[in-house]
Image: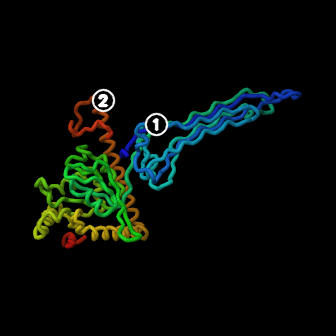
Amino acid sequence: MKFVDEVSIRVKAGDGGNGCMSFRREKFIENGGPNGGDGGDGGSIYMMADENLNTLVDYRYTRHFDAERGSNGGSTDCTGKKGEDLILRVPVGTTIIDSATQEVIGDLTKAGQKLMVVQGGWHGLGNTRFKSSTNRAPRQTTPGKPGEQRDLKLEMKVLADVGLLGLPNAGKSTFIRSVSAAKPKVADYPFTTLVPNLGVVSVDRWKSFVIADIPGLIEGASDGAGLGIRFLKHLARTRLLLHLVDMAPLDDSSAPDAAEVIVNELIKFSPSLAERDRWLVLNKCDQILEEEHDARVKEIVDRLEWTGPVYVISAIAKIGTERLCHDIMRYMEDRADRLANDPAYKEELADLDQRIEDEARAQLQALDDKRALRRSGVKSVHDIGDDDWDEEDVDDEDGPEIIYVRD
């Protein structure tokens, strides 16, 4: 199934039914009086989060959705039938945005969560509503009100506990295959991962967490290069970032340079996202001599001025992966306990989450604006090169803690 995480759609609620003008016509009854009924309300449109969906592909080609119109009122005081509501199912983690105002209408983060996006029109009134002691034969009715209409942008962000960051071929897909049942594509060339992959990591029988692998970043990603920031937004809702670095690049590139590229791109995309808890994971330790580990680790740590935990692993050989997963699970449990017992920490995280969302949306909107200029015929766009365009919508004071596991 094709992975689609952004779509634009138009939704139109049903119009209200018109009121009816009618008078009683019965044998032996003179001057029967008005009996025109009201129309029915128009149907509304709702968005509902469905845990069985993981893509917005259903909305890629069908972009217009109309709810049912209310029926007109009838004689003998018959009220018109209400239009059926329309429920559009979207993946959990979908944000609904008004395209005209860029207002966030809602964020569906729980399965079964429901949100009205446009309301159906109010019904028209029949002439029965206008009868009075001085107006016994009213000939007034009202038409139904038109239903609301909106252009919406749907943005899906995968919901995961842990997000993987790294250059292409850093071993992210191999790592997720090693620690979970997910089977993303793995090959010896860059950009084998083209869409985010999710894996569930079981640590103990009743303990697990979800890990997300996004396509590899390259230098200039925050400005739209490569797959750019299209998928970087998926890390906005993770709780912990793992920065994977290839300790033994095949192209003889510098591992410290590669690590620094990702940090710089992350900061350019969202300074607040760079504040998220992040661990450094040095992968492919089996590709270099054991006596060279310390020197290679020190080189990378010094370049990044790193003070957090550092894990030295080999995803393909499963060296150090079990210890890393247990530590992640322990981190998740400690974080949950602190959120439950420390209101200040909870408020701090909520503020960080909001800043990340705002910065990510601003970056994506800026890129969309530049693409719109490009498509309208503008030949030069500041800070964006021609090759960067894709026309398709496609606290240890003594230093960091370094964990080795010798299997």
Q: Quadrant of the C terminus?
A: bottom left
Q: Is residue 272 visible?
A: no
Label 2 is placed on what type of residue?
A: Ser
Label 1: element kind? strand
Residue at label 1?
10
Label 1 is placed on what type of residue?
A: Arg
Q: Residue 266: percent from the left, percent from the top?
A: 25, 53
Q: Residue at x 12, y 53 (%)?
A: 251
Are the residues flagged by discs 2 and 1 in contact, CB closer than 8 Å?
Answer: no
Mark 1 or mark 2, which is nearer the start of the sequence? 1
The correct choice, above or below, for 223 with respect to 259 in the image is: above
The correct choice, above or below, for 185 with respect to 59 in the image is: below
Q: Residue 253: percent from the left, percent from the top?
A: 12, 54
Label 2: element kind? loop
Q: Is residue 366 visible?
A: yes
The correct choice, above or below, for 344 with respect to 45 in the image is: below
The answer to which quarter of the image holds residue 203 is bottom left
Residue in front for this viewpoint, 382 or 190: 190
Depth check, mark 2 against mark 1: the one in front is 1
Residue in front for this viewpoint, 5 or 22: 5
Residue at label 2?
376
Taking 222 as reference, is 54 left or right? right
Q: Residue 364: percent from the left, percent from the top?
A: 32, 44
Q: How busy is the neighbourhood of tag 2: few (under 14 within 10 Å), some, or many (20 plus)?
A: few
Taking 176 as reference, is 261 left or right? left
On residue 401, which mark appears? none
How far, Cα to Cα, is label 2 from label 1? Answer: 22 Å
